[in-house]
Amino acid sequence: MVQQTKPQISSKAEAKSAEKLPVWLMNPERHQVELTKGRLVQDNLSKFATLVAFLTRVTPVYTAKNSPWVRIIELIGLTILIVLSSQVLFLWLILILMLVHLVILPGSVIITISKKLFKLMLVSLIVLLPSLLLQANNISLFLARVALIMLNISIFLSITSWPQFIQGLEQLHLPSVIILTLDITMKYVYTLGVYIQELLSSIKLRTFGQHVNRRVLGVIIGQVYLSAKKRTSDLYQAMLLRGYNSNNVASWKLSWNKYDLISMGELLFAVVAYFLIRGVVA
């Protein structure tokens, strides 16, 4: 009996509270202020939110089963082979190998890789446009190499997060100074991204529905510079007080599994195919 009377009591209380509310509060319509000018803050807020989300992503979009150091070696090895090769048959073999990797991945990951590939290709074409205009022959071969390299990088970025990349560098026993510099740099990019996002949010709230002057960009750059300088000085003082030295960096040991053997087998197949095709053509 008690459980049956509770809904009735709550519904009566809600009805009484609804009667006390004014009409304008009960209106479900939502009005949005559209800004036709001064979209500097609104446009960059979404970009910095995407950057912060990317830098805080501990796990990649797709969790690969091979070790991070094997992925790094495969990325570097295939990139070197693509750059050195001038045979169309070998480039077709590399493309088939990468398409096999794409088939294994889920559909959402393939869409993410396609977006990254489009952005990388667009930036590459803009940077390499003078070289394309000056080069009279083998433009198609040059574009094929660039496309394969960008596809290789896109697959690597989609299955490897930044912490896994740092772990792979430590497994390969790179100098600890280089690893620490990369790690601290990316963490500072993240903290500065959060700071800029908060700064843009405050400007958006203070200038709600108003035109934002382009001169605000200079203020933002100055604030970011002062914040970065202060954070760098604080980190340096903290490392001095804690007695930091380069030997304090933890080292990761190499780990092997059957998926690492498959990845190394693919790289070995690409190397053998490169020398065989090169020898046949020569």
Image (cartoon, rainbow, N blue to C red):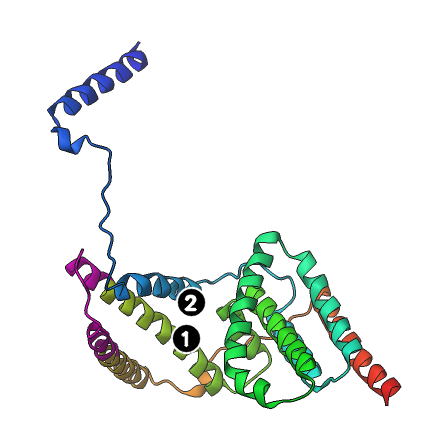
Q: Which mark is residue 186?
A: 1
Q: Which mark is residue 129?
A: none
Q: Main secondary structure of the magenta part?
A: helix
Where is residue 282, by image quadrant? bottom right
Q: Tag 1, which secondary structure?
A: helix
Q: Where does the image place residue 151, in percent across and percent down from the top left? A: 62, 70
The answer for how far apart the CA atoms under marks 2 and 1 are is 8 Å
Residue sitting at the far right? 280
Residue sitting at the far top? 1
Label 2 close to label 1 by CB (< 8 Å):
yes
Q: Amino acid at mark 2?
A: Leu
Q: Where does the image place residue 83, in percent across and percent down from the top left? A: 67, 84
Q: Nearer the viewer, residue 250 or 164?
A: 164
Neighbourhood count class around disc 2 (C-alpha, 10 Å): few under 14, some 14–19, many 20 upward: some
Q: Is residue 254 visible?
A: no
Q: Is residue 219 above or below residue 160?
A: below
Is 58 on the left-hand or right-hand side of 233?
Answer: right
Q: Is residue 94 visible?
A: yes
Q: Which mark is residue 55?
A: 2
Q: Amino acid at mark 1?
A: Met
Whether the magenta-drawn stretch holds residue 55 is answered as no
Callout count: 2
Is 233 on the left-hand or right-hand side of 56?
Answer: left
Residue at the image position 68 percent from the left and 57 percent from the top: 104
Residue at the image position 48 percent from the left and 86 percent from the top: 178
Mark toward the start of the polypeptide (2 vs 1): 2
Neighbourhood count class around disc 1 (C-alpha, 10 Å): few under 14, some 14–19, many 20 upward: some
Locate the N terminus by quadrant.
Answer: top left
Residue at the image position 58 percent from the left and 90 percent from the top: 134
Magenta residues? 201-224
Where is residue 243, by image quadrant? bottom left
